[in-house]
Image (spheres, coloured by chain):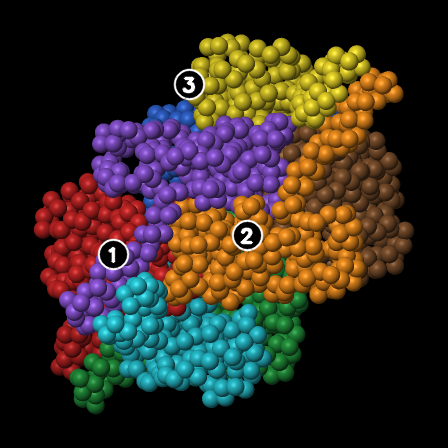
Chain colours: A green, B blue, C red, D cyan, E purple, F orange, G brown, H yellow
Amino acid sequence: MDEPALRQLVDDLRAGVVGPDDAVARLRRLPFVDLGFARVDHHRALRQRAGEAVYAPGKTPHQCAEIVAELLAEPGETPVLLTRADPQQVAAVLGTAPQGEVTATGQHATVCWRAAPQRTGRVVVVTAGTADLPVADESLAVLRAFGFCPELVADCGVAGVHRLLASADTLAGADAVVVVAGMEGALASLVAGITPAPVVAVPVSTGYGAALDGITALLAMHASCAAGLTVVGIDNGFGAACAIARMLP
Amino acid sequence: MDEPALRQLVDDLRAGVVGPDDAVARLRRLPFVDLGFARVDHHRALRQRAGEAVYAPGKTPHQCAEIVAELLAEPGETPVLLTRADPQQVAAVLGTAPQGEVTATGQHATVCWRAAPQRTGRVVVVTAGTADLPVADESLAVLRAFGFCPELVADCGVAGVHRLLASADTLAGADAVVVVAGMEGALASLVAGITPAPVVAVPVSTGYGAALDGITALLAMHASCAAGLTVVGIDNGFGAACAIARMLP
Amino acid sequence: MDEPALRQLVDDLRAGVVGPDDAVARLRRLPFVDLGFARVDHHRALRQRAGEAVYAPGKTPHQCAEIVAELLAEPGETPVLLTRADPQQVAAVLGTAPQGEVTATGQHATVCWRAAPQRTGRVVVVTAGTADLPVADESLAVLRAFGFCPELVADCGVAGVHRLLASADTLAGADAVVVVAGMEGALASLVAGITPAPVVAVPVSTGYGAALDGITALLAMHASCAAGLTVVGIDNGFGAACAIARMLP
Amino acid sequence: MDEPALRQLVDDLRAGVVGPDDAVARLRRLPFVDLGFARVDHHRALRQRAGEAVYAPGKTPHQCAEIVAELLAEPGETPVLLTRADPQQVAAVLGTAPQGEVTATGQHATVCWRAAPQRTGRVVVVTAGTADLPVADESLAVLRAFGFCPELVADCGVAGVHRLLASADTLAGADAVVVVAGMEGALASLVAGITPAPVVAVPVSTGYGAALDGITALLAMHASCAAGLTVVGIDNGFGAACAIARMLP
Amino acid sequence: MDEPALRQLVDDLRAGVVGPDDAVARLRRLPFVDLGFARVDHHRALRQRAGEAVYAPGKTPHQCAEIVAELLAEPGETPVLLTRADPQQVAAVLGTAPQGEVTATGQHATVCWRAAPQRTGRVVVVTAGTADLPVADESLAVLRAFGFCPELVADCGVAGVHRLLASADTLAGADAVVVVAGMEGALASLVAGITPAPVVAVPVSTGYGAALDGITALLAMHASCAAGLTVVGIDNGFGAACAIARMLP
Amino acid sequence: MDEPALRQLVDDLRAGVVGPDDAVARLRRLPFVDLGFARVDHHRALRQRAGEAVYAPGKTPHQCAEIVAELLAEPGETPVLLTRADPQQVAAVLGTAPQGEVTATGQHATVCWRAAPQRTGRVVVVTAGTADLPVADESLAVLRAFGFCPELVADCGVAGVHRLLASADTLAGADAVVVVAGMEGALASLVAGITPAPVVAVPVSTGYGAALDGITALLAMHASCAAGLTVVGIDNGFGAACAIARMLP
Amino acid sequence: MDEPALRQLVDDLRAGVVGPDDAVARLRRLPFVDLGFARVDHHRALRQRAGEAVYAPGKTPHQCAEIVAELLAEPGETPVLLTRADPQQVAAVLGTAPQGEVTATGQHATVCWRAAPQRTGRVVVVTAGTADLPVADESLAVLRAFGFCPELVADCGVAGVHRLLASADTLAGADAVVVVAGMEGALASLVAGITPAPVVAVPVSTGYGAALDGITALLAMHASCAAGLTVVGIDNGFGAACAIARMLP
Amino acid sequence: MDEPALRQLVDDLRAGVVGPDDAVARLRRLPFVDLGFARVDHHRALRQRAGEAVYAPGKTPHQCAEIVAELLAEPGETPVLLTRADPQQVAAVLGTAPQGEVTATGQHATVCWRAAPQRTGRVVVVTAGTADLPVADESLAVLRAFGFCPELVADCGVAGVHRLLASADTLAGADAVVVVAGMEGALASLVAGITPAPVVAVPVSTGYGAALDGITALLAMHASCAAGLTVVGIDNGFGAACAIARMLP
């Protein structure tokens, strides 16, 4: 029940078309209906920024295609995303919605339809090593879907700190930075010390020695000595892009 | 070596006052000097937002007082903060810098000098329960030091979701939200579903059953089904405030 | 806004006392107000079973006394509980609400006001050893507050299985069983194999060797080979009693 | 030795058919025999509710078929279940016991023979996302085998809380609720706050970021701020159904 | 119901003193009564070796004294032990049972009454360092209570392997060896490679670096490359002594 | 250098065949040579009980065959074992040493040559469920290789405690018991309460819910309330058999 | 900008070829350029010892070949290494750079080009068992690439300590020792007690029981009672060799 | 039995003073006696570098004093150390050995007697923050005892990387570096990228957020992307100094 429907009910009540008992009954249900309405409003606002995303793992290619088709059927201008799709899933969604833009993210792919109009925020995605690229690629694809033109600064692992410092001006001038780093995750602390911009760290499940599939990087990022660093889940390049989309206009 | 000193060296070189060997020797050292200079620049920019913070635990009251006095001695307008100070430490710093504003944060206190000029961003700090208040209080004190007028929405634990929904408009209209929650940390997911604003989640080391001193909340917040949620370390109300200060103008 | 108030608004609308714009405005707010109302309804229903409970740790004695007084001020017949209170907190609440019944639960105490009318469900609380008694005592106190007359079967650790089997008829005839066990928590599996009744297991943070403060018992109870066993958090005797209150009429 | 056999022994003793030494010898063995008898009694009572379940993993298709055939050979009316069976195992059991009803549960299947007569308890199974469906399907299949007509309320993740609230009446009116949720498992706390019915939470080994194969959800559910929530093991949809079968008439 | 009582019932039945219905009723109860009886038998056998032990932590001094007095009141010749008692508890038990022999075990003490007659098995207790002595002392005290004359070989940490090898003959000639070791627990593997006797390893909660309160030693002992090594819980010197008492005549 | 060689050196010295400097040089090397000698002695003693075992995983079939052949080439009467061999490894060793006795242990196999003469100790291997059988089978095969005639008591999970109690006499009369149990591992505590014999518990990496690949069972067995229970590593049926071989004559 | 270029700029400045503004602009950039220069210097120094290593996992065969070709194209005499390469990667790099020397390291291989001139340091690599050989092989291959002639002392597990002691002189006379050990990792402590040389321990992800994929060995090595032992990451034979290359001339 | 005694035995044998049987008997014991002798040799060599260290925690002040006195009584020139001593322990040892040099290391102290003659290796100890100083102080005190003149470079946390770079030349020119860092431990990776010298990282149990008492830093240091970094246990400043003493002449 949206606002016009609510107003109609009020008018019907006043006109006697609806009796008081019926009105109370319908109004008692209103919280949830209207809550839906209010929620939808918030969600629409949210969607204007982040769009609709479908997480592919665990869904059949057919299900992926159906959900994407349904989301695109609903008139709108917000992006629709399919993340972590395997080749079969990609083929299926492109069969029904061929205009999707595919970005490879390691073994998987991100597919985007109706990318948002361009936004002006300067977003930099920094990676520690080549093994972090699939996660960075997901982040970049989602940022582009949200209208950003993110810049990639790759292979800046702290063991050769000069590689990072060579991009210090880029980092210092960014509006937001995503740091994608596995192993010990130390790059996030370093970047947060260089830039005053918001820094979102993505721990990556790479590395060996004692990397524990990304848990070490996640813990290290949270124990960071750099103030104001925030962290998303392991390998969650998508989440980091969504966080940036919340932060920047 | 700052820019004028660098220009002086160049002039001295051209004038023959400094010989080429000496110049090379001094310029070889320049990277670090200048790097310091460049860093300071970034730090100053950073500081204009986040100020200087002293983490009290592990320092003697005397050390706290000395460091704070030194920071205040340097002319500037950026805030100076002492966090997690015990009563002896608070007494000592107020003895040498009596204009500090003290905010109790559970057993400890945050002290602020030279709070930043007011900023317009609407920041909301939401807590799940009363046990989360000390961490929220730290976040609020640091946000105020940075110039914000944060609003506290307390005691919104998800077991009584209507308490949170009653503040849904406040959350939906915020420019940034800090969610402070121990136990299962579920509040962060919920809030991120209600507001399009950036949401920084602070896991809190409270709760029992299987709360594991905040680790359960930290993990749960990272496993969250809400897109774009970011997380700081356990009990790190200070860090959440710094993250907000990076995000908002 | 409860149902009579809602009905009044409908009547005022029909009578023209309230104009349609005002009504829509108030009704737009209704979701949350009514949601509160609806929640309260559920909560009241819930409360008829579980009452209101205040978790004392982290609250001052004064705060405990104030919250309890407020809960008792609201007319009603449902129990009010203060759990895990220390002696100062107990003294404070008894100062303002002296009719509370105090049950020692190890170092702490549970205080109950307005215990519910007696319920007929036969509830048995089984413990593995004497170290589990404080947690069992909390469960017993809360069960009594909810109107049950629970029976305690103590000291039935599986290392002397005959002690448990001697009470097999009691367990088989129960309507619900709470198993309170630290160390390896094996008692829960055993009890669930003896009785067809619902069994709620409470892992206890006692034991040594590799008990890990109750985590071993919690994990073991979840890995149990006994079908249909459910588990609450470590030391959460209160939660087990609430679970029973949900299950039995 | 069942009761008639026991009575026969008593009669034989009185009639002198059995001498006192023999009787004592046999009666000394009685505890175990009779204990078996008594156990069987309890087990029968239990079985009238929960039936016999065979856990397929680790058994050959032939073993599965043999065990199921043996269970069905024994006259009775209680359900027989095969859980988590792979296609070979399903084919084998249907070869010898073709009347089994097969329910797909993700990659595996649950097969049921002799479903119990219908029970009246209203059981609701709520899931957080599509990835939770295999576990929910197992729970639903086992509940149906026990005679329930469970209702599925799918895809109610807390990031869009309005989806859950739209089913609030269903939850509030249920006799028991199973909450199946991976990731951060927050849905369980929310549902327990909405319904006064018993709530059994099933953590699911899905999710990424920091889901740790369901351990995060399990811990979060145990750290829940909702009173009276109980938890079963990770992915244990079968266990949750058995727990419900213990609770409801 | 012990065997004579059972025989009496059989006689009464035959004599007509007890009717068949009464006999069946009493015999139906027999499993548990007799089970108790049977258990007691086993327990008596057990006790002839291991005696009765009271774990002091969590009990009041008065409770300790009462339990010990009760155990000693029961005529018998098996040892009675109080373990991990603090000074108040020791004073209380000696007040009512002054003949107890007190062995200091670090901060606590083991008290023994009615030590078993001497046994011939040669038991050696080896420790890695001085910090392991309290746990070794507990093991020694309990072994002595069981009738052994254990030999202590102290301070044989593997970092100076010659210290251990100097006692190689002692170890090779032992009937059983208890290895008490914290830190990395490597001593257990070494000893098991030297002696053909049963080796019971006790991980100790000492050490730093990454000792994790004994968990590292426990894990290391279980990952040991030495075949046939067995392990008891962290700091469980009592348990190791009981294990030896089970092994040796 | 063995004892005759040592005696020869002494004779040579006395006879002047070897000069004092040479003797000192050779004797300085003696510790290690003799230590080897001494070790071999101990090892031989050990081997008379436990034999030589080759752990197959990580070795090529050819390597397995070579090592086994070498061990069998050395004249002796002690058993030679190959454990956890895959079919290729089994085929290779039987190719060169065809008299090996193969026991299937789940996916792998144990192969034994030169089984020890029969020993009289009554060893019982108890399992909790069918999934524990591969580990029990390894234990049984190794026990048989050491000369024991172990008895298997299968499927005694604590959820149906009567199944275990039916074998109580067998357990009470055993000289040593191996308990093989996954899931929550509770069976070990129970068995240790029934028998005075040494009990060696083997945690098994089976189960679900929260079994954590055997870690839960391992921890639970160490937190056991049963005194004198010892534990070997996860799935280490071989180790349990070796432990028994150390304990019994 | 390297030193000659810097000197050229100084000369140009003095000669008036470059104006002061341009010089300042270029010099302001110098920190990062020169930092690169300075870094390169350090790196060159480092490289003279450790060379350039490419970690193959996660790279395509083509990428591996390209990177190796590029490294070899740059004139120099320092070694170039490809580590943990699979057969496809090995084939690809040998296609473009056929002079590489291939060392099998279990399933993978290490390939080395331009091995460094021989160094005199005596390096010993000790392993506990055959399963540790792949990691030891990687360490040996990298040590040889750095110019060392390492000696392998294999199969010295502590359960047969005489095997280690037989090589005690070798260890005592080494300039550096790498200890490669899985399972409980105890060998590291033992070796560190025998030799005064630096000892680098490599925990290996082998073993069962409670080896936790090398975590147990890593923790045990850090909890070691041997003073001055250092540790690298799990399975990191490469890292241990690099550490030795840093230590020895 | 040292070398002269061995030679005496040889002479006695040749002279007939000792018969062959007696000689064999004594020589059979020789391995251990001589082994001790041989060990002592190695240990003396070791001691010439690392001295004797007494770990104070868990020892009484009297015990500390006795052990230190005994070590000093033995003529020698190698250092004697008491580590982590509390004030009572310090007072006691200075009472009997007043020439000890006391270095405060946070709440504890390191005491050194007979510091080694000066060594020429340039050792740098780098710390991330002030909270790391107690651990660094222990490392410095032990390095001084071993004859080094270590340089402290304090407060170089990576969040302000310019602070570290300002000391880059110092690090690049060091012969060995100890990195003492808590929180995320990232400093170790950075330093290892700057210097070609051996780098020993000491994780420190400071920090909050997710520092887990140093475990996060330990894991991060092992997952480091910097080749050739080695790590010692948490807070083990003593161990790092011993490792350096093994590495440098």
Q: Quadrant of the N terminus of chain F?
A: top right
User: Residue shown at 75%/12% (left/top)?
Assistant: H17
**Circle 1 residues within 10 Å: few <14, some 14–19, many ≥20:** few
Q: CA distance from mark 1 to mark 2?
A: 34 Å
Identify the mark at residue E4; answer none if there is no mark.
1
Residue that extends furthest to the left in the rendered view of this protein: C99
Element carrying mark 2:
loop
The residue beneath circle 2 is F120
Task: Kindly identify the amino acid type of the residue bearing the numbered disc 1.
Answer: Pro
Chain of the residue under label 1: E
* Residue C94 drawn at (x, y percent): 12, 46
**Disc 1 secondary structure class:** helix
Is residue A134 placed above or below G75 in the rendered structure?
below
Label placed on residue F50: none
Amino acid on which disc 2 is placed:
Thr
Q: Position of residue B61 (x, y in %)?
A: 39, 26
Q: Is residue F80 left or right of residue B225?
A: right
Kindly tell me whether residue A208 is visible in this rendering. Answer: no
Residue H88 — which label? 3
Q: Is residue G81 above or below residue H32?
A: below
Host chain of mark 3: H
Q: Callout 3, which amino acid?
A: Gln
Determine if marks 3 and 1 fall on one subunit: no
How many callouts does the rendering have? 3
Helix, strand or loop at mark 3: helix
Front one among H6 and H157: H6
Q: Is D178 in front, or is C187? A: C187
Res D45 quadrant in image: bottom left
